[in-house]
Amino acid sequence: MIRWIRIFSSILLLTSALSLGTSDSAYAGKADKIVIDGSTTVGPIAKAFAEYYMSNNKDVNITVSESGSGNGAKSLLNKMCNIATMSRFMKDGEFSAAVKNGIMPVAHVVAVDGIAMIVHPSNPIKELSVEKVREIYKGKYTNWKQLGGPDVKIVMISRDTNSGTYETFEKLVMNKERIEENAEYVGSNGAVRQRVQSTPAAIGYVGLGFVDRTVKALTIEGVYPDSRSIASGVYPIARPLYMFTDRYPRLGTHLHAFITLYLTPRGQEIIEEIGFIPVTQYKYNK
């Protein structure tokens, strides 16, 4: 939790500093168009925000693409979008490349998410430890029978390596150890869920907003992933979700109004409706 506190504190300080001296960003003054690109996890929030914002501002056109967190960062630093949605923090190399290109990335934490381990509803397994999940993806456990389940080969589903969800899983679960080469890689959270829905022996990982009745989320380390356990910081595989802009948007622009929508009551309702946790509910856990 210390790292999260540092992240939130850094963002607050940076935001406060920049809000006192916003610059003439390449996009901040454009009133009628906002381009968003990046994470498939944050994508549903961006789309719901865009739909709501455009319904109340008929002169504004907002487009949302979901090419992955890494591509969102590239799009921002190449001045191809106004907002990069990312399910991980921007890497040092990405930040340096942006600054060299005249872009000053500012992070806005719009929600908190838990990464849920999901299996087919017919799988009798209900709980795993982080270590056992790691050993599955390392290839130590290859059959559900080894974990108290049916005698069938485990089918591992992973996000593609350009995904922020993949990088969070690699860090919080895999401890940077390699995923076994037989794992299947897919391009979105929705694709992971779809693969697990149709494969009784499959296991995968998705953002909490992608858990529904067609899959079963597993309890991890004795904690079930839901809004309460994630908001309290108890669930072990959790992360902030970001939107990055070039500098802090000029006050009074549509870009500023849009990027701060997550702080409004309606913005928080939208985040909850999609299945994520508003930052206003997050409680620091020492």
Image (cartoon, rainbow, N blue to C red):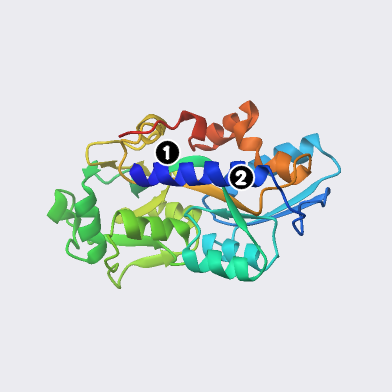
Give the foreground label among 2 and 1.
2
Compare residues 50 and 102 and report the one nearer the observer: 102
Q: Quadrant of residue 195?
A: bottom left
> Badge 1, how many Cα within 10 Å: few under 14, some, many 20+?
few
Q: Residue furthest right?
A: 59
Rendered position, 171 above or below 180: above
x, y percent for residue 147 = 15, 51
Q: Quadrant of residue 158?
A: bottom left
Rendered position, 11 above or below 229: below
In the visual, does 169 lie left or right of 24? left
Where is mark 2, residue-wise? 17
Name the quarter where the N terminus is drawn.
Answer: top left
Mark closer to the chain start, 2 or 1: 2
Q: Which mark is residue 213?
A: 1
Residues at discs 2 and 1 in contact (Cβ within 8 Å): no
> Badge 2, how many Cα within 10 Å: few under 14, some, many 20+?
few
Rendered position, 14 above or below 91: above
Secondary element type, mark 2: helix
Does the rendering let one see residue 98?
A: yes
Secondary element type, mark 1: loop
What is the total number of numbered labels drawn onto the structure image?
Answer: 2
Compare residues 248 and 112 and report the one nearer the observer: 248
x, y percent for residue 105 = 60, 57
x, y percent for residue 152 = 21, 58
